[in-house]
Amino acid sequence: MTALAAELRALAPSCGPVRLVAVDGHAGSGKTTFTGRLAAALGGAPVVHLDDLATHAEPFGWTGRLREQVLEPLAAGRDAAYEVYDWTLRRFASTAALPSAPVVLVEGVGAGRRAVRPWLARVVWMELAAEDARRRGKERDGPALAEFWAGWARAETAHFAADPSRPYAATRVDGVTGRITPSTVGEPSTSP
């Protein structure tokens, strides 16, 4: 993790003065856990969790909010603040501050999508098969969210079919072991 943190710090800025790094993968693949460890290795790098920007009605309809509330302020060299969706109340109910920093992490399904890639210094992909990730997520969330997972599986499959992130990941992480493996497959992480 220390080597990856050093590598990310050495990248050219991609969003104003910020090196914006996406951690993407299937729901349940370990993105949040890995991102927390990476943020700590980076000395407390700020993290945007895309679950805070997504909604029940638009699980992948967050790109405009991300651009306006996070990317544009960071690109201008300013701190950002974004509205946080409350999944229980089913509405945006609070605001999160996001300080500008040398490295900022964006974590969530679709973080490396086409609309975000021009702002990114790196895409990190959590390597875990969709069915294994879903099983892990269902175990984590319990039976109360079984209906949500059924709908989510369809939305995620459609999203990655239309806009895959994995081919653009310059760094891949084994979703089971957490081992970081440099990618030798795919295009550079900043390609459209």
Image (spheres, helix red, strand yellow):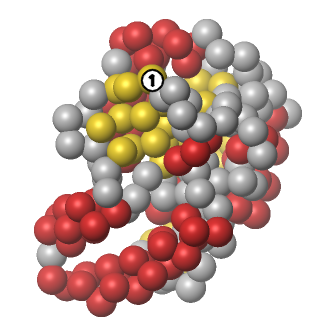
Vertical side of 36 occupied by 154: above or below: below
Q: Extreme right residue here? A: 76
- 67 on left or right of 152: right
Quadrant holding the N terminus: top left
Front residue of 163/5: it is 163
Residue name at image x 23 percent, y 61 percent: 132
Which amino acid type is shown beneath numbered disc 1? Pro
| x, y percent for residue 187 | 66, 36
| x, y percent for residue 131 | 28, 67
Is residue 187 among the parts visible in the rendering?
yes
Q: Extreme bottom residue here? A: 147
Residue name at image x 72 percent, y 54 percent: 114
Q: Quadrant of residue 26?
A: bottom left
Q: Secondary structure at mark 1?
A: strand
According to the image, label 1 marks what residue? 182
Residue name at image x 14 percent, y 68 percent: 139
Front residue of 64/87: it is 64
